[in-house]
Amino acid sequence: MMSGEVEARTLQALLITPLTVRELFTGKAITGVGMAFSQALLLVVITGGLSNQPVIILVALFLGALLATGIGFLLASTGKDMLGILAWGILALLILILPALGIIFPGTITNWAKLIPSYYLVDTLNRAFNYGVSNQLALTNLAVLLVIDVILLWLGIWALRRKMA
């Protein structure tokens, strides 16, 4: 999305209009979060995952979509070309998958996995789907995830502003 516009120089054309960087990011964020959230929600609905803790699951899915969008913004804003962004995106995806492997293979992941942002999403969803997570643990995980999301989105906007200056 963003990287194609930077590479094709259409982003400069957008920013010549009265559109601000914040408005551009807001529009792209709504689109990115909407696409990621709707796909995750469709999967959860099809598999019947909303039968336990539906509010916690919906909030976690939304924050997960925000996480994916924030990482995408940051990569697109800092990357030089499409292939470089793709390479960094694959590396980010491999790192973000690690906490899920700890659920698939219990005992393989230790406390260091809490350094990976997706840990808080995966842990919340696992406990909500399988164990009926307590509201306190869910709120703690979701609050940490929200802070990480905001930081990633802010870094993406900051990097794009620096790149466009």
Image (tube, helix red, strand yellow):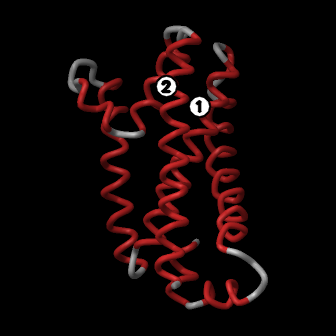
The type of residue carrying mark 2 is: Asn
Dot 1 and dot 2 residues touching (CB under 8 Å): yes
Q: Earlier in the sequence, mark 1 or mark 2?
A: 1
Mark pair 1, 2: CA separation:
9 Å
- Residue matched to label 2: 141
159 lies above or below 164: above
Report the mark closest to the observer, 1 or 2: 2
82 lies above or below 121: below
How packed mark 1 is, by other alpha carbons closer than 10 Å (few <14, some 14-19, many 20 or more), is many
- Residue matched to label 1: 60
Q: Residue at x 55, y 17 (%)?
A: 128
Q: Nearer the viewer, residue 91 or 14?
A: 14
Q: Residue at x 53, y 11 (%)?
A: 133
List x then y, in percent, for residue 161: 53, 75
List x then y, in percent, for residue 148: 47, 43
Say which element carries label 1. Answer: helix
Q: Residue at x 31, y 36 (%)?
A: 115
Q: Nearer the viewer, residue 7 or 158?
A: 158
Residue 140's label in the rendered image is none
Left-right relation of 154 to 92: right
